[in-house]
């Protein structure tokens, strides 16, 4: 099973927004589950496997607290 981040937008001039996530055995199953869970009222939907996501973190400057996610 893989966890996928779900991003979607309803208009081209809108940014993709994180709608939630789904867990599925593969890409097609994830797409099907995302459509069921988040509906079809979007123009574009993108699914990103969490294992493929790269999280760029800002380096903490001296005196700043580092946030762990």
Image (tube, rainbow, N blue to C red):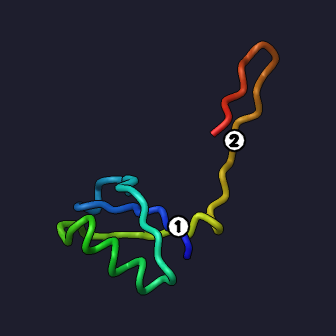
Residue designated by label 1? 3
Residues under numbered marks 1 and 2 in contact, where contact means CB atoms less than 8 Å apart: no
- Give the residue displayed 23% in from the left and 61% down from the top: 10
Disc 1 to disc 2, C-alpha distance? 21 Å
Q: Is residue 60 left or right of residue 6?
A: right
Quadrant for the C terminus in the image: top right
> Closer to us: mark 1 or mark 2?
1
Q: Residue furthest top?
A: 63
On the image, the x and y values in percent for residue 65 come to 71, 20
- Looking at the image, is mark 1 or mark 2 earlier in the sequence? 1
Where 19 sits versus 62, above or below? below
- Give the residue displayed 30% in from the left and 53% down from the top: 14
Q: Is residue 5 left or right of residue 45?
A: right
Disc 2 crowd, CA 10 A, few/some/many (<14, 14-19, 20+): few
On the image, the x and y values in percent for residue 62 come to 82, 17
- Give the residue displayed 41% in from the left and 83% down from the top: 29
Q: Is mark 2 on a helix, strand or loop?
A: loop
Front residue of this view, candidates 58 and 65: 65
- Give the residue displayed 42% in from the left and 61% down from the top: 21
Disc 1 crowd, CA 10 A, few/some/many (<14, 14-19, 20+): some
On the image, the x and y values in percent for residue 48 come to 52, 68
Quadrant for the N terminus in the image: bottom right
Q: What element carries label 1?
A: strand
Q: Residue 39 got which mark?
A: none
Residue designated by label 2? 57
Q: How many marks?
A: 2
On the image, the x and y values in percent for residue 51 come to 65, 67
Where 66 sits versus 25, above or below? above
């Amino acid at each position: 099973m893989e966890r996928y981040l779900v991003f979607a937008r309803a208009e081209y001039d809108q940014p993709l927004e994180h709608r939630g996530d789904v867990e599925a055995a593969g890409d097609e199953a994830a797409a099907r589950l995302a459509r069921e869970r988040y509906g079809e009222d979007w123009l574009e939907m993108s699914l990103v496997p969490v294992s493929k996501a790269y999280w760029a973190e800002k380096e903490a400057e001296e005196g700043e607290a580092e946030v762990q996610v």
